[in-house]
Amino acid sequence: MINSEEYKESLLYIKNYWKKITCYHPHDKQLHLGLPNKFISPNNIIFKNDQFYWDSYFTILGLVKANKNNLAKGMVDNFCYLFDRFGIIPMRNRYYNLGTSQPPFLTSMALEVFSYDKDILWLNKVMNVAEKELKKYWKNESLTETHIVYNGLSRYCDHFITHLGSEHESGWDMTSRFKDRCLDYLPIDLNSCLYKYEMDLAKFFKEYKNPRKSKMYFDMAERRRTEIDKLMWNKKKKFYYDYDYKKKVQSKFISVAGFYPMWAGLASPEQAASIKEYILPMFEYDGGVVNTQQHRLSSDLKQHDFPNGWPHQQWIVIKGLLNYGYSDDAMRIARKWLDMNHKLFMETGKFWEKHDVVKCEIGIYNPSRYPTQFGFGWTNAIFLRLINEFK
């Protein structure tokens, strides 16, 4: 068990910081698209008035534990508004990001909020938007930015169909993982997210008495799982890999993305056991879970590479372990992450965007991009969520 008293200074900081990063930007102005409801930005410095797509899921995980469910609900409604207006949930509410999305977490956000307030009319509305997002963006083969490209599996693809833009859509901006050829890969994390998206819709329609739609989405998810197993599961190496569909080979690059099938629930118990036993020790360090392998990285430092670990990826790994009953491993990693964050907070008075989990220091960055930010929305949220998960 984790005792919240050990982290009381950090928890007080988080409690007081929400108001600093709660934004309200109701009208289109300059770079930003207007949003009807208040929302959380990562920080109030370079990301002020930005609501990011995948950040918001991980932020909501903390908001619901901070008794801010109405704020979380409004953030989901903001995404529904953006989709209704533009036919895409952009990576954030800036004009120049309208051709790029991020990993799809809309159903996960909606179900997280619904688990606290049980507003079925609201959930029905959001799930209808989610259906449209899946059909009109992620599975729409008539779009310029085609995502389904090989055996029913999907890639990241921005509107301009560039490797760089697609890597931004992945959220891993930037990483050695895609070798600067992001368009050529079927990513294991994206396809796991889409599997969960399809399963969420299947379960929703089963619960609410639409057997035709429920079966359609169950079948859709099962086809995706079958292809993921064929192309991305490596039985010998006991892990999931991205698939280079242009060269028709698995990538040899190992990353935390391979844990997404456990988070999504698509891994078999046997696959999950193999990952826990043989792969988890390769990623686990004193500060938590690292993002990628240490070797064969780009010559220029990329922020989503070793030795950095990110708060949202800690949640993916920890939740995946919990899904398969590995609570001791999950709590061990959670405590490492909490201890490192608390230590750095006591030293710096801040929470940080990313971390060097090997040395338990502030995350490293490429000087050509922005410095490591403090604040920080999803870091605060995951810290709070983990304490609540294991108290």
Image: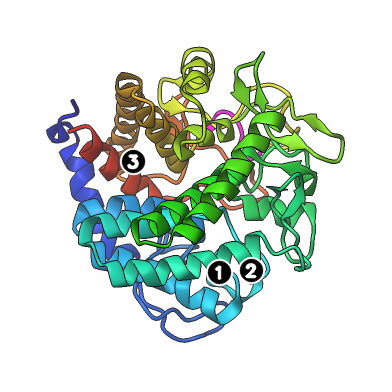
Give the residues drawn in magenta, as a range.
302-308
* Left or right of residue 368, residue 318 in this image: left
Residue at position x 53%, y 79% in the image: 84
Task: Judge depth for marks 2 and 3 and give the one in front.
Answer: 2
- Report x, y in % for residue 116: 22, 57
Numbered disc 1: secondary structure = helix
Residue nearer the viewer, 183 or 39: 183
Alpha-carbon span between mark 2 and mark 1: 6 Å
* Left or right of residue 332, residue 312 in this image: right
Q: Are marks 2 and 1 in contact (CB under 8 Å)?
A: yes
Q: Which mark is residue 136?
A: 2
* Left or right of residue 246, residue 44 in this image: left
184 versus 342 height, above or below? below
Residue 56 in sight from this viewpoint: no
Badge 3 is on which residue?
348
Numbered disc 2: secondary structure = helix
